[in-house]
Amino acid sequence: MENRFGKITTIEKVMELFHDGLVLMFGGFGGVGSPPALIDGILEKGIQGLTLIGNDTGFPHIGIGKIVSNERASKVIASHIGSNPIAGKLMHEGKLEVEFSPQGILVERIRAGGVGLPGILSDIGIGNEIVTRNKPQMTLNGKNYLIETALTAEISIVYAKKADEFGNLVYDKSARNTNPLVAMAGDITIAEVEEMVPLGHLNPEEIITPGVFVDYIIPTKGVNWKWAWE
């Protein structure tokens, strides 16, 4: 298999980039579209004190929920945690800091981070002391807005159906969810993929994430790319 762009690598190599206290952004929605090999690699390496940014905390034993359930995260920025009761328990015990952000606002904050904007304006929560606490506000054209800061991460991890050696990514149906935005917002983006194809073999109309956003590509669990390539 060719590796002209130096992006194709192994789980062992990318794990060298992970460390305690890392700010980590992840794709997925309730576990669908989250990268299983990378999540298990984090657990096996014993990394802790993570700040996690993503749609939710998965389920106790599915997706990013495994990291939360094993108390490897110190903070979560998400739209909800209800599908993982362990996350709620840890929050109430003071072991997990949780910053809630409405789902639409959350993905817009991630998108803003990915395109280099410092934040977005939103009128959601104006007049609610709990929502507006510690958030800057401004008036534009006579209307009040909250300034929601953009979200970025040291490392973003995403899951894709197909990739070529440059890192152009194709997602499988609903597994696409937040992955394209997450891929844009990491200083380093690692894509875990099911199938590798030669450059030029992806239909341009299918490509959702351009390879310019992807730094490393690894195979998902149980996939031997050498066989797939041949």
Image (cartoon, rainbow, N blue to C red):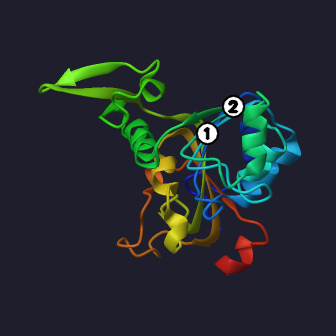
Secondary structure beneath dot 2 equals: loop
Secondary structure beneath dot 1 equals: strand
Q: Nearer the viewer, residue 79 or 50?
A: 79
Q: Nearer the viewer, residue 26 or 125?
A: 125
Q: Name the mark on residue 165.
A: none
Q: Percent position (x, y) of residue 176?
A: 50, 64
Q: Can residue 89 be seen in the rendering of this structure?
A: yes
> Residue under circle 1?
155
Question: What crowding class fits label 2: few (fewer than 14 Cα within 10 Å), some (14-19), or many (20 or more)?
Answer: some
Picture layout, residue 148 above or below residue 156: above
Q: Are marks 2 and 1 in contact (CB under 8 Å)?
A: yes
Q: Amino acid at mark 2?
A: Leu
Q: Percent position (x, y) of residue 179?
A: 52, 56
> Residue under circle 2?
22
Q: Amino acid at mark 1?
A: Ile
Q: Residue furthest bottom?
A: 230
- Give the side of residue 99 with respect to residue 95, left or right: left
Q: Nearer the viewer, residue 20 or 103?
A: 103
- Give the side of residue 116 with respect to residue 38, left or right: left
How far, Cα to Cα, is label 2 from label 1? 8 Å
Quadrant in which residue 95 is drawn:
top right
Quadrant in which residue 59 is drawn:
bottom right
Residue beneath the point at 79% across and 71% down: 222
Q: Residue furthest left?
A: 141
Q: Percent position (x, y) of residue 29?
A: 58, 59
Q: Can residue 67 be seen in the rendering of this structure?
A: no
Residue beneath the point at 56% across and 57% down: 4
Quadrant in which residue 209 is drawn:
bottom left
Question: What crowding class fits label 1: few (fewer than 14 Cα within 10 Å), some (14-19), or many (20 or more)?
Answer: many
Residue beneath the point at 42% across and 32% down: 150
Looking at marks 2 and 1 on the same chain, the residue that comes earlier in the sequence is marked by: 2
